[in-house]
Image: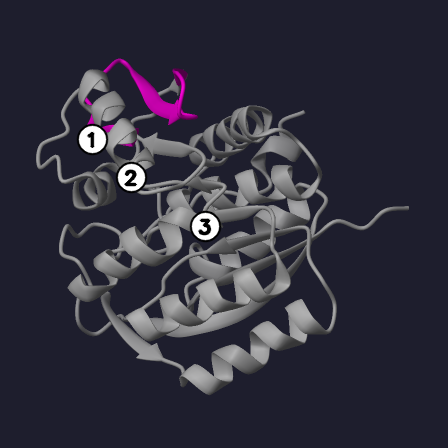
């Protein structure tokens, strides 16, 4: 039996709904063996309105983790999440080049859920100039798409298409802009651009605020599909179905947050 393997280079979400925890749950659900390289540890403070505290790991610790997986095991696909500094971004790019990683999913995490403030503004430049050109697919949400494309207001599907074209000029082979609840449409619309044409992906839009980890989950589902050899369009289609089911079955974790439910696609069959 062929074992497909994927590496997530991202932050650890202590509450379990996003980051590496979401990546591993998604990989497992989609039949891929998941491995991790932790960039930062994120904790949430229940005594301060669930504020996010971020603890970066030393660069040499990240490199040791990546060498364990890339040099010692090998992978079929790689996904990035929260990369807190340009030094981290440069290290990830170096490892992608050194080991010739073919399937690279860049989830350009720039802010914690519920905020529109870039965690580290300098990393936006690194994502644009260093990682985007190495991406098989980059998966920004609306806020991230404004930062990457330079289009400051994305309010419609046509705006999403225009932003996808601009982001594609940075060098990724494919761009997926996730519309989610930010676009005023009756359904949840995403735009996939492969350099030639835009494909519109639609799914039901659910009236819920329990979407913690949705972006991480969507990107890791794409990663799983690519690791198993699916073409990009098929991997995105599968991932869209996976995240739709996960959001539909999302639930409150406490008074502050509610994550998507990663097992929903399997339990609903």
Report the span colored magenta: 179-201
Q: Nearer the viewer, mark 3 or mark 2?
A: 3
Whether residue 111 is visible, yes or no, is no
Q: Which residue is mark 3?
A: 134
Q: Quadrant of residue 183?
A: top left
Q: Earlier in the sequence, mark 2 or mark 1?
A: 2
Question: Of 80 and 29, which appears nearest the observer?
Answer: 80
- Element type at mark 3: helix
**For discs 2 and 1, the disc positioned in front in the rendered view:** 2
User: Residue at the spot x=33%, y=34% of the render?
Assistant: 168
Question: What is the CA distance from the residue labelled 3 to the residue labelled 2?
Answer: 19 Å
Q: Which mark is residue 128?
A: none
Q: Which residue is rendered at x = 13% and y = 56% of the image?
A: 117
Which percent across, then down, holds residue 210? 34, 42
What residue sits right under mark 1 in the picture?
A: 182
Residue 141, labelled with which disc? 2
Q: Residues within 10 Å of mark 3 (few under 14, many from 20)?
A: many
Circles 2 and 1 in contact, beta carbons < 8 Å: yes
Please give left or right for residue 141 compared with residue 8 in the image.
Answer: left
Q: Position of residue 217 (x, y in %)?
A: 47, 45
Q: Is residue 184 magenta?
A: yes
Reply yes or no: does residue 54 show up in magenta: no
């Amino acid at each position: 039996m062929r074992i497909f393997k994927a590496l997530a280079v991202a932050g650890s979400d202590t509450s379990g709904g996003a980051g590496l925890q979401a990546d591993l749950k998604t990989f497992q659900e989609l039949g891929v063996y998941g491995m991790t390289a932790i960039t930062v540890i994120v904790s949430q403070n229940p005594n301060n309105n669930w504020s996010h505290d971020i603890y970066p790991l030393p660069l040499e610790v990240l490199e040791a983790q990546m060498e364990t997986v890339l040099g010692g095991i090998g992978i079929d696909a790689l996904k990035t999440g929260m990369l807190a500094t340009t030094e981290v971004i440069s290290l990830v790019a170096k490892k992608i080049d050194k080991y010739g990683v073919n399937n690279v999913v860049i989830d350009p995490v720039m802010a914690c859920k519920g905020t529109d403030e870039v965690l580290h503004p300098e990393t936006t430049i690194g994502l644009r100039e260093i990682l985007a050109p190495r991406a098989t697919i980059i998966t920004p949400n609306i806020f991230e798409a404004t930062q990457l494309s330079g289009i400051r207001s994305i309010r419609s599907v046509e705006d999403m298409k225009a932003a996808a074209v601009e982001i594609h000029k940075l060098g990724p082979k494919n761009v997926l802009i996730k519309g989610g609840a930010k676009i005023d449409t009756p359904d949840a619309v995403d735009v996939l651009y492969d350099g030639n044409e835009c494909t519109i992906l639609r799914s039901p839009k659910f009236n819920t605020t329990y979407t913690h980890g949705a972006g991480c989950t969507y990107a890791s589902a794409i990663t799983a599909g690519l690791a198993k050899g699916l073409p990009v369009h098929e991997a995105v289609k599968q991932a869209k179905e996976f995240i739709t089911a996960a959001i539909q079955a999302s639930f409150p974790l406490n008074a502050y947050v509610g994550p998507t439910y990663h097992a929903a696609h399997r339990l609903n069959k």
